[in-house]
């Protein structure tokens, strides 16, 4: 075996030089392309012909474009904040008993109580004044003590002290049982299971229809308006009240329904109480009322009417707390004359103009939590003969004057004025309607991962491979800059 010796002089000078920086970077990129888990790039890197490389390059770019389209659409869909509503039934053996509000059908409105009516009430000895030029609310309202024959809750006696009053523009003074109070130490919300009961309120009322001011109640001769609502809701009894006729025992069975809405950015719901609404609530005997969209719309409409007319609509005279746009000052506005043509015209303007509504009512969005009660009414003839005598004794013992023909027609009068109301909990199941996000951040991440994996096979590890390649390129560039090699 012979040894062959090659002289170093036979090697060129270029063979001893290290690889050029450009070729080294290409080597790093080619190594990444050959070994990455991303589909398409290995096909480009290992192609031996231009046609093959062109095929894989076009294929990769096409499917990359499709992936980018679907990934972009998934992200865009998320930022439209779509929602869906789910229905669930929750069983609550003990739940807060709702608030129950009632009003005598006879209203007490300043704009309708004119001088001749005051003289008429004086003649019936209803009022105690010889002054026919003024009329105070205290002279006009129906006092609870003169209406409430009897009250029991779960078999326990309740009195007029268990009610709070508020003013309705249509029905005057109304009374609420079981409203949530700010001072809960003295009057906490009652529950259906209190005193071992199942949640039943019994009211026996006397309307004194002979004291109704003529023409104000229109075609109604006697009756009560009632409403079942949430403990923290100012009752919109003018809109949602149920008319209850006298001479009947009314059973109002209720089922609770709760609606929960997502806050921003999914909806524009709010629980923030505006200044005007807070000023209005502060007048209601310490009740802890929450934000109401309908009340907010009424107040902002009144604010626009005040801005145009210098007074507010007499049709909503109980809503006189005004805060003008771009101010934080609350005022109690005066009431327009009923014959003033300005306030109905202003009401029409704000109703028909989106621009005006956006200026005055932009904050009147829906509530984030809304509690409703589905009421099933039924009735039976009342009172019985024995209870008619109890009603007669009640009418004769309170301060309200009796009709002139009472001695001969008291039974007829009782039948025309007696109203019995039983409010009962029909079901311990609560319907919960909950708004939820249709697309969550996890859903977006899953969609992006699904599309990237389907079209070009990218995963988080593929991204780490790219990071590794970039690190090697940067490190190589640093070595070149520092050592020149």
Image (cartoon, rainbow, N blue to C red):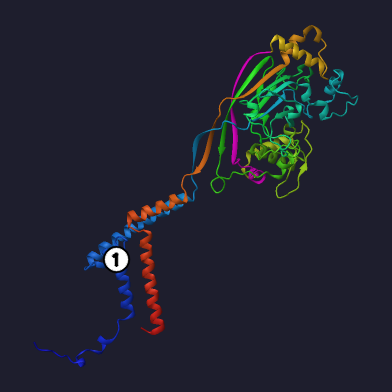
Residue at (64%, 33%) from the top-left corner?
230
Closer to us: 219 or 446: 446
Image side of residue 189 versus residue 330, left or right: left
Q: Residue furthest front?
A: 196
The quadrant in which the C terminus is found is bottom left
Q: Is 209 placed above or below 90 here?
A: above
Q: Is 280 placed above or below 418 here?
A: below
Residue at (72%, 46%) from the top-left corner?
324
Residue at (38%, 60%) from the top-left corner?
460
Image side of residue 447 versus residue 211, left or right: left
- Return the residue at label 1: 35
The location of residue 272, given as percent across then percent down, is: 65, 45
Q: Is 335 placed above or below 382 here?
A: below
Q: Which residues are magenta?
A: 356-382
The quadrant in which the N terminus is found is bottom left
Residue 376 painted magenta: yes
The location of residue 135, given as percent across then percent down, is: 84, 28
Q: Is 403 placed above or below 281 here?
A: above
Callout 1 secondary element: helix
Please tell me in which quadrant of the rendered image residue 470 appears: bottom left
The location of residue 363, given as percent across then percent down, is: 64, 45
Q: Residue furthest left?
A: 1
What is the number of callouts on the image?
A: 1
Please tell me in which quadrant of the rendered image residue 396 appears: top right
Closer to us: 42 or 96: 96
Closer to us: 127 or 386: 386
């Amino acid at each position: 075996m012979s040894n062959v010796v090659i002289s170093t002089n036979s090697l060129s000078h270029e063979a001893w030089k290290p690889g050029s920086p450009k070729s080294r970077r290409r080597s790093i990129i080619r190594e990444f392309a050959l070994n990455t888990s991303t589909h398409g790039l290995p096909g480009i890197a290992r192609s031996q012909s231009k046609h093959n490389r062109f095929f894989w390059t076009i294929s990769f770019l096409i499917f990359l474009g499709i992936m980018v389209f679907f990934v972009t659409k998934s992200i865009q869909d998320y930022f439209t904040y779509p929602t869906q509503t789910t229905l669930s039934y929750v069983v609550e053996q003990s739940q807060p008993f709702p608030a129950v509000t009632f009003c005598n059908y006879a209203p007490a409105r300043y704009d309708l109580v004119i001088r001749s009516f005051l003289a008429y009430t004086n003649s019936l000895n209803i009022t105690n004044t010889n002054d026919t030029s003024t009329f105070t609310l205290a002279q006009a309202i129906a006092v609870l003590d003169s209406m409430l024959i009897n009250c029991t809750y779960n078999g326990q006696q309740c009195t007029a002290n268990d009610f709070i009053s508020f003013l309705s523009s249509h029905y005057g003074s109304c009374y609420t049982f079981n409203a949530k109070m700010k001072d809960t130490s003295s009057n906490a919300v009652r529950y259906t299971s209190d005193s071992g009961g199942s949640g039943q309120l019994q009211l026996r009322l006397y309307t004194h229809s002979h004291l109704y001011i003529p023409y104000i109640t229109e075609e109604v001769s006697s009756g009560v308006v009632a409403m079942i609502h949430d403990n923290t809701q100012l009752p919109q009894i003018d809109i949602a009240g149920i008319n209850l006729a006298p001479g009947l025992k009314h059973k109002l069975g209720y089922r609770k329904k709760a609606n929960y809405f997502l806050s921003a950015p999914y909806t524009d719901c709010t629980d923030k109480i505006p200044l005007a609404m807070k000023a209005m609530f502060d007048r209601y005997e310490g009740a802890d009322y929450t934000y109401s969209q309908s009340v907010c719309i009424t107040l902002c409409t009144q604010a626009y009417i005040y801005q145009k007319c210098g007074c507010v609509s007499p049709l909503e005279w109980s809503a006189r707390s005004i805060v003008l746009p771009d101010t934080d000052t609350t005022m109690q506005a005066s009431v327009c004359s009923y014959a003033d043509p300005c306030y109905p015209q202003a009401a029409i303007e704000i109703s028909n103009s989106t621009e005006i509504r956006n200026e005055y009512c932009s904050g009147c969005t829906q509530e984030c939590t809304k509690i409703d009660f589905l009421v099933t009414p039924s009735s039976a003839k009342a009172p019985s003969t024995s209870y008619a005598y109890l009603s007669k004794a009640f009418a004769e013992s309170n301060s309200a004057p009796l009709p002139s023909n009472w001695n001969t027609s008291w039974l007829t009068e009782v039948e025309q004025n007696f109203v019995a109301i039983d409010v009962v909990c029909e079901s311990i199941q609560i319907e919960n309607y909950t708004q939820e996000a249709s697309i969550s951040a996890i859903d977006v991440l899953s969609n992006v991962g699904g599309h990237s994996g389907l079209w070009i096979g990218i995963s988080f590890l593929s991204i780490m491979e790219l990071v590794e390649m970039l690190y090697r390129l940067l490190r190589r560039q640093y070595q070149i800059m520092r050592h020149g090699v």
